[in-house]
DNA sequence: TTCCTATGTGCGAATATAGGCACACAAGGT
DNA sequence: ACCTTGTGTGCCTATATTCGCACATAGGAA
């Protein structure tokens, strides 16, 4: 593998990893169409401030979010909407999985069986 | 946060995490438009068979790839093309980052300076 | 058939990395 | 002076990653 390609894969993986955590997925979903400060995110996610702050710093380092300071508060917002495509694609993968499982069950229950 | 939503975020994060590694990004890029067996992937990625096999098992468990056995070989292929959207979006994030940095440098070099 | 090779995968151990928690501190508002 | 907000630090635990080795399987050759 090319050395330049290797570097690119590392950077891409770093960005993807910035979203590879349940709390960070929840944060991205919260920021779908509004900007929020750390305390609000912590309240809605159900985590503690330092924890949320750390996750936000990971997402900020990855370039997924941007900040806007307003007095005492720091508002976070998504930097590009295509990040939501991650979540939607993940949902599609999940849907494909359940559809496949459903088809397997169809085969096991040939006709008319209700239970 | 709702308990059901929490579960969904965990599942989404698990799928995203299945791609959050340089080697796995490289594998997804290799499988962009062709199916490959483990040995070929190992050769092109520059890793060892057991290592690639483990990464593929992670991607398989996450539902990102599917397998097709043909005699001695096991061919892996992407299960849904929207996964490539992950990579493309990651590239866009990177591009936005360099564009932003370039703009900052523009401000620092007002006019006509070449070096 | 028997032997041999190639492929893929599971297992165990060592290392590296991430997550979570508690605390303290800086900045800004009242 | 006091409170709120956000962030940094240190510590511990859990998980991920890699490697070497061994094993099962499938195909070909003698």
Image (spheres, coloured by chain):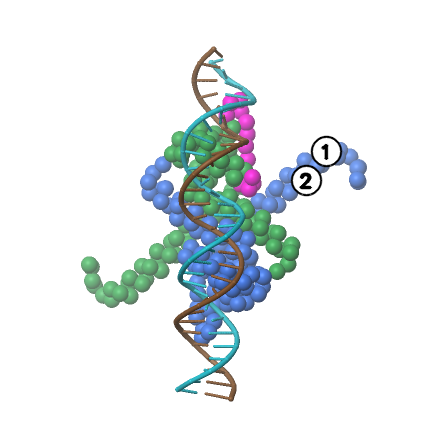
Chain colours: A green, B blue, C cyan, D brown
The spot of residue B15 in percent (x, y) is: 44, 51
Residue that carries the numbered disc 1 in the rendered image? B108
Q: Is residue C26 left or right of residue A49?
A: right
Q: Which mark is residue A114?
A: none
Q: Which element type, helix, strand or loop, lies under badge 1?
A: helix
Q: Is residue D21 above or below residue A52?
A: below
**Disc with the residue nearer the chain's start (1 vs 2):** 2
The spot of residue B47 in percent (x, y) is: 56, 61
Q: Which mark is residue B102?
A: 2
Disc 1 residue crowd, few under 14, some 14–19, many 20+, Cα 10 Å: few
Marks 1 and 2: same chain?
A: yes
The spot of residue A48 in percent (x, y) is: 42, 32
Front one among C20 and A2: C20
Disc 2 residue crowd, few under 14, some 14–19, many 20+, Cα 10 Å: few
Residue range corresponding to the magenta coloring: A61-73
Q: Chain of mark 1?
A: B
Q: Is residue A98 above or below residue B74?
A: above
């Amino acid at each position: 593998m090319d050395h330049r390609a290797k570097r690119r894969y590392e950077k891409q993986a770093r960005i993807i990893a910035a979203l590879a955590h349940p709390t960070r997925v929840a944060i991205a979903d919260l920021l779908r169409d509004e900007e929020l400060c750390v305390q609000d995110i912590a309240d809605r996610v159900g985590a503690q401030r330092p924890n949320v702050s750390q996750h936000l710093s990971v997402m900020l380092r990855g370039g997924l979010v941007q900040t806007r300071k307003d007095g005492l508060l720091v508002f976070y917002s998504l930097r590009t909407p295509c990040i939501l495509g991650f979540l939607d694609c993940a949902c599609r993968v999940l849907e494909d999985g359940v559809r496949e499982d459903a088809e397997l069950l169809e085969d096991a229950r040939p006709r008319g069986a209700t239970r």
